[in-house]
């Protein structure tokens, strides 16, 4: 039992978030397993983004608790949660379109060379840090298939490339778990599959945990390990993609409306 507990990366217990009289998230319990790709699905307005906002500190829950790596992070401000290694892509400043792809990763690094420069007395140690950061950035760019564009302006990337850049920037902040809100929205199917393939690769090679909100189930379900389905603020079902597709409750509230 204990070893199973250890594998939980993120846990919510009875998370509730109200907006006035509206209960946007109602006593939600989820477990996101370490190194999993966990999908959160549900119709428009069912509370997916609000749940994620409550997990990542944008909102304080009215009730309930959030644990990340066993630590209670309920009510911590977003920047603290981000520094704990739980990163939602929009918590990082948006890509600088005029900067190169590589520079976009470097500025997203938690220990950005500029910061080190101020804190280090000796320039030599700063250079070493910068070199390490560049090596790290190239390692991520390679996995994301962006290394050949390293010196291009970010504005030259296509929609899929920009999404991957966003994930690369999250990695530079030493994220161990990344939450993505509709990463393939508005992206053509070929690029969408490409984005999800890279997510799988990051999970396999680096052991990153992903929690992903997505409407495009035809694509997203193929790459996920586990799925939580929401409706009207509540989790109505959870299971493997196969179990979710067959679930009558999910079919009626979610698939029925597509
Ligand atoms: N800041 C807010 N103030 C008041 N009501 C809000 C706020 N944010 C969300 N809501 C409401 O809470 C409910 C859940 O919204 P939420 O954005 O979490 O849904 P969602 O599942 O992410 O939907 P979508 O799939 O369209 O992105 C909706 O009824 C929405 O109108
Ligand atoms: Mg949303």
Image (cartoon, helix red, strand yellow):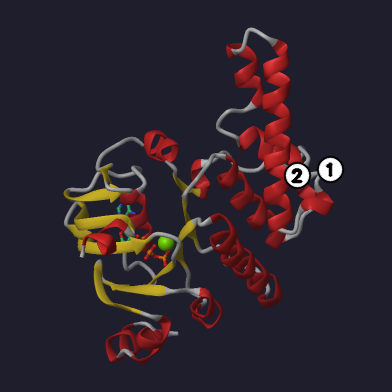
Q: Residue at x 38, y 58 (%)?
A: 49
**Residue 96 seen:** no
In the shown orientation, is residue 50 left or right of residue 173?
left
Label 2 CA crowd tier, 10 Å (few <14, some 14–19, many 20+): many
User: Of the residues under marks 2 and 1, which one precedes in the sequence?
Assistant: 2
Q: Secondary structure at mark 2?
A: helix
In the rendered image of this protein, does residue 210 appear above or below residue 218?
above
The residue that disc 1 covers is: 151
Name the quadrant of the N terminus: bottom left
Residue sitting at x 42%, y 82%: 241
Callout 1 secondary element: loop
Percent position (x, y) of residue 215? 48, 73
x%, y% of residue 71? 27, 43
Q: Position of residue 31 (x, y in %)?
A: 29, 63
Q: Please tell me which residue lies in front, 13 or 181.
A: 13
- Mark number displayed over residue 175: none
Tell me the quarter of the picture where residue 35 sits: bottom left
Q: Are marks 2 and 1 in contact (CB under 8 Å)?
A: yes
Q: On the image, numbered disc 2 is attached to which residue?
A: 101
Name the image quarter holding residue 113.
Answer: top right
> As displayed, is residue 83 above or below residue 235?
above
Residue 163 in sight in this render:
yes
Rendered-image quarter of ligand 2: bottom left
Q: Is residue 186 left or right of residue 81?
A: right
C-alpha gap between disc 2 and disc 1? 6 Å
């Amino acid at each position: 039992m204990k070893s199973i507990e250890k594998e939980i990366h993120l846990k919510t217990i009875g998370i509730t978030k109200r907006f006035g009289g509206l209960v946007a998230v109602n006593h939600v319990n989820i477990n996101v397993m370490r190194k999993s790709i966990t999908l959160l699905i549900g119709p428009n307005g069912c509370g997916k983004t609000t749940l994620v906002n409550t997990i990542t500190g944008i909102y304080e829950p009215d009730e309930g608790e959030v644990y990340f790596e066993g630590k209670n992070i309920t009510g911590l401000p977003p920047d603290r949660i981000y520094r704990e290694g739980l990163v939602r892509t929009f918590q990082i400043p948006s890509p600088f379109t005029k900067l190169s792809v590589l520079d976009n990763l470097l500025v997203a690094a938690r220990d950005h060379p500029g910061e080190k420069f101020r804190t280090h007395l000796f320039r030599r140690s700063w250079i070493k840090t910068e070199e390490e950061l560049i090596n790290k950035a190239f390692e991520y760019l390679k996995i994301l298939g962006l290394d050949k564009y390293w010196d291009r302006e970010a504005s030259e990337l296509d929609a899929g490339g920009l999404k991957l850049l966003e994930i690369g920037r999250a990695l530079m902040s030493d994220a161990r778990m990344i939450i993505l809100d509709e990463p393939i929205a508005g992206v053509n199917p070929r690029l969408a599959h490409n984005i999800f393939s890279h997510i799988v690769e990051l999970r396999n090679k680096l052991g990153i945990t992903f929690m992903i909100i997505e409407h495009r189930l035809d694509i997203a379900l193929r790459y996920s390990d586990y799925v939580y389905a929401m409706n009207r603020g509540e989790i109505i079902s959870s299971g493997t993609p196969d179990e979710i597709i067959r679930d009558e409750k999910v079919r009626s509230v979610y698939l029925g409306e597509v």
